[in-house]
Structures are given as C-alpha cells and as structure tokens.
Amino acid sequence: MWDWFINFLTAVLAGIEGFVGDWGLAVIILTVIIRLILTPLMAHSTKSTARMQVMQPKLQEIQERYADNPERQAEEMRKIYADMKFNPLGGCLPIFLQMPVFFGLFTVARQVPADASFFGILPSISLSVSQVIEASGWVAAAPYILFDVLFGVLTFVPMVINVSTQAEAQRSQTMTMGAVMAVMMLFFGWSVPAAVLLYYVTSSLWQVIQQKVITQRVMEKAKAEAEAEAAGRPIEVDVVRKEKKARPHKKG
C-alpha cells in the first residue's frame, strides 16, 4: 500500500513538473492542491476548536463536581460532547491526512532527478542543508538555510496567532511550547530534503493566510453558535437531601 502511494505521489509530482517545467514549483503546486482539498475539513476543525473553547468551563465544572465519581464524570462529559455535536478528534483529522504526503516526500525526493531544482534558487530539492554544506560550503547552502529558518518560524507563527483566542493561563504555556517546537523543527529541517522544506513552508504560509482571512471569521461564528447552544443546556446536578434526625431530648 505504501509503495503504491509513493508511486502515485511521484507520478503526480512528475506530471505537474512536466506542465510547469520546475520541480520545486511542482512541490508548491502539489501542496496548494492538497490544502484546497483539505479546506472543508479545516473549516470543520475550526468549528470543533471553537466549540471546545466554549465547552471548556463546563467540562472543568463537571470534573470538579464529580471528582469523586469518575464514572459519572465520564458520563456527563459524553453527554456534553453529544449535545454540542463535538468530536475530540475532529481537529486532528486534517493533520493526520497530511502526514502521508509529508513523509512520502522523503522517499519521492530521492527518486527525482539529481538536478531537480527550484528555479535555480535551490539547485537540488533532493538535498538537505547538511548535505549542501558538506558538498559545497556555507555560501552555497545559504538558500537552503533560509528555508530551514522559515520552516522553524512558520511552526511558531500559527501558535502566536492562536494565543489571542486563549485564556490568560494558557497563553504562556502555548508560547513556550511554540518556541520549543520551532527550535526542534530547525534541527529537524537541517537534515531533510529541500522538497520537504518547500512543502512545509508552503503549507504553513497557506495556514497563516487562511487563519487570518477565513479561520477567525469561522471561529467567531462557531463560538457564537456554541455559546447559544451551551446557554440552553445547564449542567444537571443530583441533589441528595439528608434526612433530618430527631434531636435527643435531655432528661430532666
């Protein structure tokens, strides 16, 4: 199955290259096609994220209220998810669907011609930063290093954009996690083929633009809808009344 997917991806990339005449541009066009296909799923993912943010106070209230009763806690949380039509995995689906392409490019990059370039800016999209430095030195590797830096920065930018929608307590944690992820991506990008860097940089740029132009509007609308639904569904609380015991009379 994996071999079939690699052959299919290679054929698609070669077909695009035959039309546009550049391997690097073919990778960018392939990325745009994939992102266009995933746009409806991204919109659904955005709505799921908005609903999750609205539901968070209710979920925390349930966790505190039924802290001593895990079974009832799980049952009440399932009810909330069902009532709000929320799927906890909904936000992860677009990422999971992109992963085969992302990792498939590692193999595809080795099958393209050695001189498969990106308009001469990247002489070979099959080489990594470390390989270019080893073969031709730091000056020749400068464009590759630039794309690696973009690889790291564009990992961090979407998290910064999301910070404005988070509670104060979460912002510091998100920023720290984003900075750590960016540094990790810099090290990771140092040894991957330039084709992978091109794919990720293009995909991330698309995400940033989409987030600023479309996602925020979808998020605001979904939040308003979720808040309206949540307002009509207060958490039910079992009230157990204690029996009054007769007070003992003092003997005279």
Image (spheres, rainbow, N blue to C red):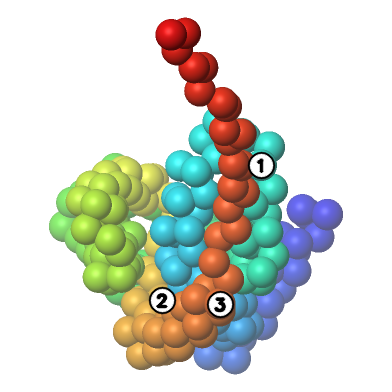
Going from N to C along the chain, the mark reached first, 3 or 1, is 1
Q: Residue at x 44, y 69 (%)?
A: 54
Q: Is residue 168 shown left or right of residue 32?
A: left
For the residues labelled 3 and 1, the Cα–Cα distance comes to 21 Å
Instruction: Decide which of 38, 236 is in the foreground and name it.
Output: 236
Q: Residue furthest front?
A: 252
Q: Nearer the viewer, mark 2 or mark 3?
A: 3
Percent of width and height locating residue 111: 62, 59
The mark found on residue 72 in the picture is 1
Q: Residue at x 54, y 66 (%)?
A: 234
User: Disc 2 on helix, strand or loop?
Assistant: helix
Q: Type of residue at label 3? A: Gly
Percent of width and height locating residue 179: 23, 50
Going from N to C along the chain, the mark reached first, 1 or 2, is 1
Q: Residue at x 50, y 54 (%)?
A: 59
For the residues labelled 1 and 2, the Cα–Cα distance comes to 39 Å
Observer able to see residue 21? no
Q: Is residue 218 shown left or right of residue 119?
A: right
Q: Type of residue at label 2? A: Gln
Going from N to C along the chain, the mark reached first, 2 or 3, is 2
Q: Which residue is mark 3?
A: 232
Instruction: Decide which of 123, 143 is in the foreground and name it.
Output: 143
Q: Residue at x 78, y 54 (%)?
A: 3
Q: Nearer the viewer, mark 1 or mark 2?
A: 1
Q: In the figure, 233 relative to 66: above or below?
A: below
| Mark 1 surroundings within 10 Å by alpha-carbon count, few (fewer than 14), some (14 through 19), many (20 or more) | some
Instruction: Decide which of 218, 71 is in the foreground and name it.
Output: 71
Q: Which residue is mark 2?
A: 207
Instruction: Decide which of 131, 238 is in the foreground and name it.
Output: 238
User: Disc 3 on helix, strand or loop?
Assistant: loop
User: Disc 1 on helix, strand or loop?
Assistant: helix
